Amino acid sequence: MADRQQALTEEKRHQAKLIWDYHQMHHKIQPTDAAIGLGSHDLGVAAFSAELFRAGLFPHLVFTGGNSPTTAPVFPRGEAVHFREHALELGVPASAILLEPNAGNTGQNITLSRQVLAAAGVSPKTVLLVSKPYMERRSYATARKLWPEVEIICASEPLDFDDYLKSIGDEKLVLDMLVGDLQRVIEYPKLGFAIEQDVPEDVHAAYESLLAAGFDSRLLAR
């Protein structure tokens, strides 16, 4: 689409910020038995996972993710492989990292990471999910569906909305992703992929407005 870099109106920025805040679970980060760094285009997930490991919050760290059309040009060896390499550069010992290089969606991230942990003899009762900021709620809802016996805590790099926009450098893409993730939060429970999440009226209204304005490149295929 044209106008990818167009300045957001104050109304659109406010609507996007409502959705951004909703996507974050605002969990208190605390020690867990293991952590899972969810692969994506955002290398900040690997950096923040490394920071939390160095803080002593967990002994085992899984990086999970193969490739998608979005990430293949950036991470040609796969998301998890590149995340692991970055974490090693940041001081996480290789012995603490487990690799899951095949997942192609969030459900597979959870299921295959669980298998990797089990194969390593790790049966966690608590798991920290580290993701992009706007992916917290969807990853939480997915994990609670697929791994209900484990306590799930979500975390992401502590960036405010404007800083994240600047870090990505493409305002339309970020809004498209915010809208696309919220659509999945709404629709996935109906498909059996996730537990249901309450969506406040103002957040749903913001979602409908941004959809109508054309922020729709990351919607589910119909």
Image (spheres, helix red, strand yellow):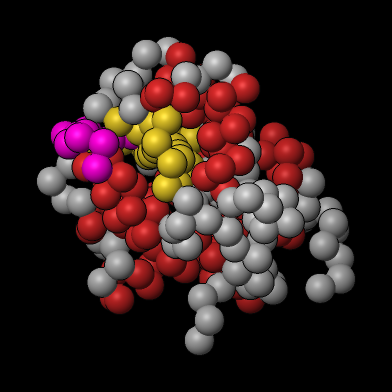
Q: Nearer the viewer, residue 205 or 149?
A: 149
* Left or right: residue 127 compared with residue 81: left
- Identity of the residue furthest to the top in this view: 55
Decide: is 12 above or below 190. above
Q: Is residue 125 magenta?
A: yes
Q: Is residue 82 left or right of residue 27?
A: right
Dominant secondary structure, magenta: loop
56 in relation to 193, above or below:
above
Q: Position of residue 171 (x, y in %)?
A: 75, 53
Q: Is residue 2 left or right of residue 112?
A: right
Compared with 187, 18 (above or below) is: above
What residue appears at the point 47 percent right and 68 percent down from the top-left corner?
183
* Residue 42 horizontal/vertical position (percent): 62, 43
**Residue drawn at x 23%, y 57% as measured from the top left:** 146
Q: Quadrant of the N terminus?
A: bottom right
- The x, y position of residue 190, in whole percent, is 29, 75
**Percent of width and height locating residue 141:** 31, 54
In the foreground, 58 or 164: 58
Please state the extent of the stretch shown in magenta in the rendering. Answer: 119-128
